[in-house]
Amino acid sequence: MASVLPITAIVFVLSITIAPLEPGTLVLFLFGAVLLVLGMGFFTLGVDMSMIPMGDGMGVALSRTRRLLLPVLIYFLLGVLSTMAEPDLQVLAKQVPAIDTQVLVVTVAVGVGIFLAVAALRIRRSVPLRRLLLFFYALVFGLAALAPINFIPVSFDSGGVTTGPITVPFIMALGLGIASSRSDANSASDSFGLVSLCSIGPILAVLLLGVCYQPQEVPYTAAPIPEIATTADAARCFRDAFPIYFHEVATALAPIVGLFAVFQAATRRFRSNQLLRIGAGLIYTYLGLVLFLCGVNVGFMPAGSFLGATVAAGETRWLLVPIGMLIGFYIVKAEPAVAVLTKQVEEVSNGSISHKAMGRALSVGVCISVGLAMVRVLTGLNILWLLIPGYAISLGLTFFVPPIFTGIAFDSGGVASGPMTATFLLPFAMGACSALGGNIMTDAFGIVAMVAMTPLVTIQSMGLYSEIRHRLARRRLRYHMERVEDVVIYFD
């Protein structure tokens, strides 16, 4: 409730001041907010009961297999099958007019599958995450120089949306399970990083698609806003949408559940009471995601598009920047996978990195990113002018912060750019861009990429501050110990 209330209040205040919403759109938004609250509750409970134990158990078992071919194949299949049905990716693909939906989905899924296998092998082989990040991001920006300009924002957006609410909890738990088979000092920090590397795969894959694929220019067509005359009409919209999301979420969960069933049949790792708990958790996860996705797609997407267009069409279009920053600060709190990440970070770090500190760093990062995205919508600034310095700073910080902060930061970028970004912030930017007569492909797309980038800087900055503070504390301690030794020597 606390995570959804701020964004609901912001939209309500905007709707009665500078960006009046049609009554039907506002009713849809409020209905959607109620579904978000219910969905978040069921999802959080279900993930704790099912997705985390499943991922952890499979990670432990696969890491103990001496042969590499079978685990690599399983990791690849997990990445491909779970990504192809990821709701966030489906939302993005349907909003990209220049690329066939299935071509984009398959390209992204293969990229995730390959990099999930790479990320899992990195943990098993104790390869420093920083080394892979430097290499692959150099490759990313090298390919970006060859790809058509229209593909660059979409490719970076693809990296953000693939790590959605279904795949993130499972992938993070898988990383914990793989790392737990090691007993060295770096195993805890190496458990992070799967999400960050899985976000790079789609970027490279779509950039390669841009080099090889010659799309036809198709004009963007905004999704129609349904005509709502009464609250009964609004309820009917959600009623008609529920079967769609029941099917979508079932399709998205099926690959993970199917592979887990095969794993359980082969290993008999979980006892019957554990399987019952996992089964109940999967039901909660399923219901939570159906409620959540129905709420954001039916209720939030029309409101985001309408608000962006209304603010941009007025004389005070510069307000897009502060309004976007305010929305960004609070909207990340409603991302379902963020709660999973912050809880896991607090547990792995034994409380030294609290979920409150993580939440503040994520909010500040997304606040900055949405503000910069709105500047792009207003000015048409090339996204590379922001991405290249942003990633240069992020990768530079990896040399000065503890490895655990690097893993957490790069994972956070993928987690922060979830369904709330794809179904509210992206339509907000697209609505504003359409009202301003801008290029949707180059100016509006890229907001997901910005949301995925800035947490890398804010969370590593938090780690840098922590490292500096600890060094100063150790220096003061040594100073006082030397003073005590001098006193003891004097009296001796």
Image (cartoon, helix red, strand yellow):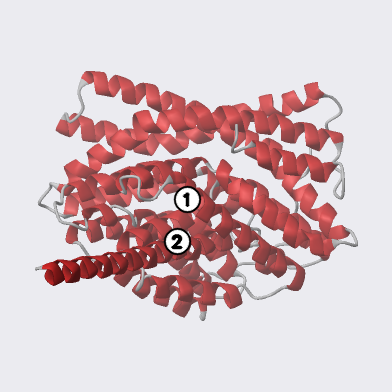
Q: Amino acid at mark 1?
A: Ala
Distance, label 1 to label 2, CA atoms, is 8 Å
Mark closer to the chain start, 1 or 2: 1
Figure check: 359 above or below 166: below
Q: Amino acid at mark 2?
A: Met
Figure check: 183 above or below 458: above
Asked whether the viewer can see residue 337, the reply is yes
Looking at the picture, how far across and down is residue 414, in whole percent?
47, 55
The residue that mark 1 highlights is 357
Instruction: Determine the residue positioned at 53% across, 70% down.
Output: 210
Figure check: 262 above or below 449: above
Instruction: Determine the residue positioned at 81% across, 54% down.
Output: 309
Which one is in front, 445 or 404?
404
Q: Could you say which quadrant of the image residue 284 lies in? A: top left
Q: Quadrant of the N terminus?
A: top right
Instruction: Determine the residue positioned at 27% across, 46% down.
Output: 176
Label 1–label 2 contact, CB within 8 A: yes
Q: On the rendered structure, is 433 left or right of 412?
A: right
Q: On the rendered structure, is 296 left or right of 388?
A: right
Res. 462 mark: 2
